[in-house]
Image: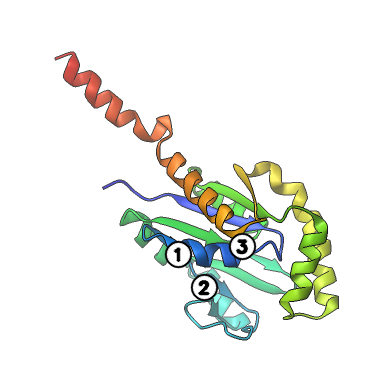
Amino acid sequence: MSRGKLIVVSGFSGAGKGTVMKEIMNSYDNYALSVSATTRSPRPGEVEGISYFFKTDDEFRQMIEKDELIEYAGYVGHYYGTPKQFVEKNLDEGKDVFLEIEIQGALKVKEKYPDAVLMFITPPDAKTLRERLVNRGTESMDVIEKRLARAAEEANGVEAYDYIVINDNLQECVEMVDRIVKCEHNRTSERMSIINSIRNDLTK
C-alpha cells in the first residue's frame, strides 16, 4: 500500500473552503480531513474534535513546546495549528489527507513535506467574496473588513501554490479537487517504480 498524499487547501476567507471540504468528505471515502487546533471561540454549530480542537492560549503553547504541531500561525488575533499525529497516521494508512489552513501555515507545511500539494480555492471575483462573508452572518462588519484586507495580502502568496480552483459552482469545484488529487497520484515520479519493474521483467 502506498503512502497517502498530503493536500493543503487554502483560500480567501469566505471562498467556501469549509463547504468544499465537507462535500468532499461526504462524496468520497478515500480522503481524511485533518482537524486543526485553534485558540478562537467556537462558532454556532461547531463541534469540538470535529470542527476544531478548541484550545486556550496556554494549551496551545504546550502543544508547540511538545512539538505536537506540523505548523501553526496567527490569524486575526487567534492561533491555528495542525496536530501531527492524525496526519501521519492517515498518510501511513494510505489515505489522502486534506489540511484546510491559511497561507502562512501552508508554506511551512511545504517546507516539512516537499511532496505536499498546495491548492488555493477562490471565488470568481471580489464582489462574490464580500457577499459570501456578509451573508454568512457570523461576524461583525469590522471583522469582515479585516478579513477582506487580509485577503488582499494573501493574494501575494498564491504563486507558491500548485493549483488554483475557482469555487463558482460547488459540485464542479468538488469534482475538480478530486480530479487534481487523482492526477497527482499518476505523476511520473509516483509511478516510476511500476515502469522500472516492467523494464526489469522485459530485459531478463
* Left or right: 161 in relation to 138: left
Which three-letter amino acid code belongs to the residue tagged 2? Met
* Left or right: 106 in relation to 1: right
Number of residues whose C-alpha sits closer than 10 Å to that of mark 2, classed few (under 14), some (14–19) or many (20 or more): some
Q: Which residue is mark 2?
A: 63
Q: Assign a secondary structure to mark 2.
A: helix
Number of residues whose C-alpha sits closer than 10 Å to that of mark 3, classed few (under 14), some (14–19) or many (20 or more): many
Q: Nearer the viewer, residue 35 or 135?
A: 135
- In the image as oriented, which residue stretches furthest toward the top? 203
Name the residue: 43% across, 34% down: 187
Q: Quadrant of residue 188?
A: top left
Q: Assign a secondary structure to mark 3.
A: helix
Does label 1 or label 2 sit earlier along the sequence?
A: 1
State the separation of the CA atoms marked 3 and 1.
12 Å
Where is residue 191? Give x, y as percent.
35, 32
Where is residue 200? Give x, y as percent.
20, 20
Q: Which residue is mark 1?
A: 25
Q: Assign a secondary structure to mark 1.
A: helix
Q: Which residue is mark 3?
A: 17
State the separation of the CA atoms marked 1 and 2.
27 Å
Name the residue: 41% across, 32% down: 189
* Residue 35, visible in the rendered structure: yes
